Image (spheres, rainbow, N blue to C red):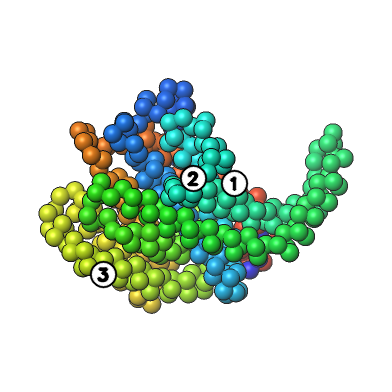
Amino acid sequence: MIPAPVKHKFFTPGVFILIILALNGLAFLAVRFVSGIGAVTNLDNVTPWGLWIGVDVAAGVALAAGGFTSAALGHVMHREEYHVIVRPALLTAMLGYTFVAFGVFVDIGRFYYIWHPLIMWNGNSALFEVGICVMIYLTVLYIEFMPIVTERFIGRVNLPDFISFLNKPIDRALRYIDSRLSITMFIFIIAGVVLSTLHQSSLGTLMVIAGQKMHPLWQTPILPLLFLLSAIAVGFPMVIFESLFASRSFKMKPEMHVLSKLGGMIAPIIGIYLAFKIGDMFIRETFKYITLFDTPSIMFIAEMGLLVIAFVMFISNRVTHSPLGLFIASALVIAGVLLNRINNFIVAYNPYYNPVKYIPSFGEISVTVGCIALLVLVYRVVVMIFPVISQDKEDIIKKI
């Protein structure tokens, strides 16, 4: 199998639905930038963050972890058979972190000050560490994607007649970039893995600092470790989910020979996360809060239930060798980690003297859904232009 642009029609009924959702989100974004953040959200001075931070940023960072986990597996550990998933995982991570950076930009009240952390450093701030690592890692991801761009256009630069004189200079520039990156790429791969572990855990540090504002079911000194482990746990399921979804969308045969092996690695990782999570609850004696059956306890039970069910499913060889079983089990892990981030940043976080319970507005939901729809559309465009998804040579020839 070799990476190649996907030959498939772009517009489908599903794509039209995504376009409508994206346009709806963009409309509310326009209102947000023209009239201010209060015109679209239910945030106020007491509730400083909500859906955009909980989902767009915190959950987005976790769900983009497939980039560094697959890079570590394929390149750092030299597991050559997994190289077919590295490029799609890299693209998902690159778009995911772009989505995260945009989410931060949208959520900041004075969005035009987003550049401040670049020159106003605060080494004592956990949030600064998260921000600077995300910015550097996003840059690293785009650099890692450059060889795919050069592979697509080297020898194929064909600009219109009035600027055709630029064909050779651009081709020479692409060849030079490709030759330099082939020598230095290992530096960026290692940097990407290291940076990811740093900011994934620092998001947990941010919530540790919240102290008693956090519900006891989630507030623990080992939150940085739990955030890192949960991000690692969702990395491979996200890769599997994306691969199976893309295969179904483009009517291609799923790469089960790779995905099944990948699925076999997930149960131990989830098991380690659950062991730390449950062990911490025993040590802090927080099980009593589950029996209250209030909103936090129900959300905690739902979060843990999703991950436990996924753990049991991934133990089964029947599940890991079934496309549908893998898809459902991976979706459960993704939902569990998504719910974990929502719980930590929205459900568990309760500022003092908060007279109103925060509920996301329709505008907030529309922007989040619209950005996700836009991300999927961009992914579809990119894989149809660049050699990202590996395909059988015979299938490529047939489509040509």
Say if residue 78 shows up in the picture.
yes
Q: If the image is split into quadrants, where does the C terminus sit?
A: bottom right
Q: Mark 1 points at which residue?
A: 381
Sort mark 3 into few (<14), some (14-19) or many (20+) by Cα contacts within 10 Å. few
Q: Name the residue under label 3.
A: 279
Question: Residue drawn 34% across and 36% down?
Answer: 48
Of callouts 1 and 3, which one flags the residue occurring earlier in the amino acid sequence?
Answer: 3
Q: In which quarter of the image is residue 370?
A: top left
Q: Mark 2 points at which residue?
A: 122
Q: Which of 372 and 13 is in front in this view?
A: 372
Instruction: Give SS at disc 2.
Output: loop
Outermost residue on the top side: it is 35
Amino acid at the residue labelled 3:
Gly
Of callouts 2 and 3, which one flags the residue occurring earlier in the amino acid sequence?
Answer: 2
Sort mark 2 into few (<14), some (14-19) or many (20+) by Cα contacts within 10 Å. few
Question: Residue drawn 52% across and 52% down?
Answer: 133
Per the model, the C-alpha gap separating discs 2 and 3 is: 34 Å
Residue 385 vs 353, above or below: the answer is below
Task: Give the number of the mark in front: 1 or 3.
Answer: 3
Per the model, the C-alpha gap separating discs 1 and 2 is: 39 Å
Amino acid at the residue labelled 1:
Val
Of callouts 1 and 2, which one flags the residue occurring earlier in the amino acid sequence?
Answer: 2
Sort mark 1 into few (<14), some (14-19) or many (20+) by Cα contacts within 10 Å. some
